[in-house]
Amino acid sequence: MSKKLTLQVASFARADYARADAVLILAGAQCLPFLGKTGLPVALKKAVAAASKQEAQVTGAGKLTSLLVPVGKKLIKVVIAGLGTEGTATELRKAAGAAIRTLQEGSYATAVVVAPLLLEAAPAASLQAVLEGLELGNYEFNVYKSQAQQPQPLAVTVLTAARNSRRTLKEARIIADSINYVRELVNEPGNILNPEVFAEEAKIVAKDYHLAIEVLDEHQLVHKHMGALLAVGQGSLHPSCLITLTYNGGGDKPFLALVGKGITFDSGGISLKPDDNMGEMKDDMTGAGDVLGALRAIAALKLPVNVLGIMACAENMPGGSAQRPGDIVKSASGKTIEVISTDAEGRMVLADAVWYAGYLGAAKVVDIATLTGAVSVALGKETSAIISNDDQLAEAIKDSGARVGESWWQLPSLPDLAAAIKSDVADVKNSAGRPGGCITGGLFIGSFVKKDLPWAHLDIGGTSTATKTSGHIVQGGTGFGTATLIELARSLA
């Protein structure tokens, strides 16, 4: 059970260990000698020193060491979370996330977080990583557990010498809250979250964060000739929709369009998926969730930028009216698509959505989607792929991801793979088979982007969901990509 977390920051000079029930120490291999500067009570310093002598790897990356130390008339829970040798912001985020979960069970009401890396004029990025790690690691999805108890309150004070620490705290909480919001959406089952419900959620976000919103229903999609999006959802009882949120915080600056795939459940359609793990396909709307979460945070942070958030939502089901392999559909751009596989549906809804971004006048387009399983084969489960027609934009995404602890790798747009999506009976086909599948999927989407418009496709097929809890990542929806989109918007400011 997660605790209801209240975060605050304080200087080392104002450290109040006497009232704490627990102390979380984030320390790397070179950090332990500097614990004396943190004001730790003598009993705690001795306990940590003894533990480090008995266990050589106490500061190893991912290592957690728990102690119960008598201080006065009470026992204090001490958790040492290892940072390894580098102590990067990413390691701080992971260590904080793992450490906070050790307090989820037990009657701990107050805790102090100590990290020697936050001594002196610590960079704001280090403090932000710790704060985000605490919020993200404390997350748990238990809304459907009938025996779930009310969250217990836990007040955590992070000691820091960083300048503007209160502003950093505010920003970290906004970002982490938006990531956890995306996790909530992704973890909702398909019988609860469908395109109409997602649209209603977007309306709530628009109202709460003062964003303009447009929701195109099926009739309006027909009027705008969005045949690719309509084809994907035509086998479902739940109608498709295209949602656009507009954040205008940058005056007359050009607009960045963030475009998300919102398949609320993907059965594969007529090209039915195997039943093993099909339930995981509730996460196929993660791209749209990332966009909604990012717009939410961008507005809360009041970033001086202009952003369009476009979410293409549909449910891919094998009903009697579903599209068939061999069908030819016409997209909003006028291009025709030969349907090779109805399980290659995400790229079809994005085909109309990225075209619409150009139609609305976006100066840059970034789409994000759980597009392929091939991306996991290529890059594993911790790195996501970029396919782009603009190396500068791709580098900006990679740099943004590096700053927030999300890993991206640009794959080449090879000419032979671009040729592979050409169809004999239509302009393009929606699947070119397994070879280079991650790249051909991205290039298919790119073929619908307005000519000369900078565009990047982000494939989060391997990172959207975690099968186990580790660090600040909790089993289930990860919200991967949300932080990168927020940071990308910030960088453009």
Image (tube, rainbow, N blue to C red):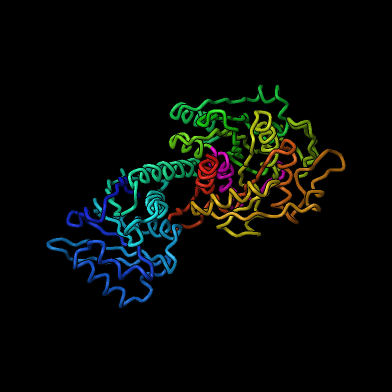
Residue 287 percent location from the top left of the image: 58, 42
Residue extending farthest to the left is 73
Residue 2 percent location from the top left of the image: 35, 49
Work out whether residue 472 or residue 170 is closer to the camera in this orientation and state it: 170
Q: What residue sits 36% from the left and 64% below the top? A: 81
Q: Is residue 41 visible?
A: yes
Work out whether residue 281 or residue 272 is closer to the camera in this orientation and state it: 281
Q: Is residue 192 visible?
A: no
Work out whether residue 195 or residue 22 is closer to the camera in this orientation and state it: 22
Q: Quadrant of residue 256?
A: top right
Residue 139 inside the magenta-drawn segment: no
Q: What residue sits 67% from the left and 31% below the top? A: 356
Q: Main secondary structure of the magenta part?
A: helix
Q: What residue sits 30% from the left and 71% below the top? A: 33
Residue 234 percent location from the top left of the image: 68, 32
Is 285 placed left or right of 35 in the picture? right
Residue 436 percent location from the top left of the image: 73, 55
Is 305 placed left or right of 91 in the picture? right
Work out whether residue 293 or residue 109 is closer to the camera in this orientation and state it: 293
Is 428 placed left or right of 88 in the picture? right
Residue 276 inside the magenta-drawn segment: yes
Which stretch did the figure color magenta? 269-291
Is 126 placed left or right of 305 in the picture? left
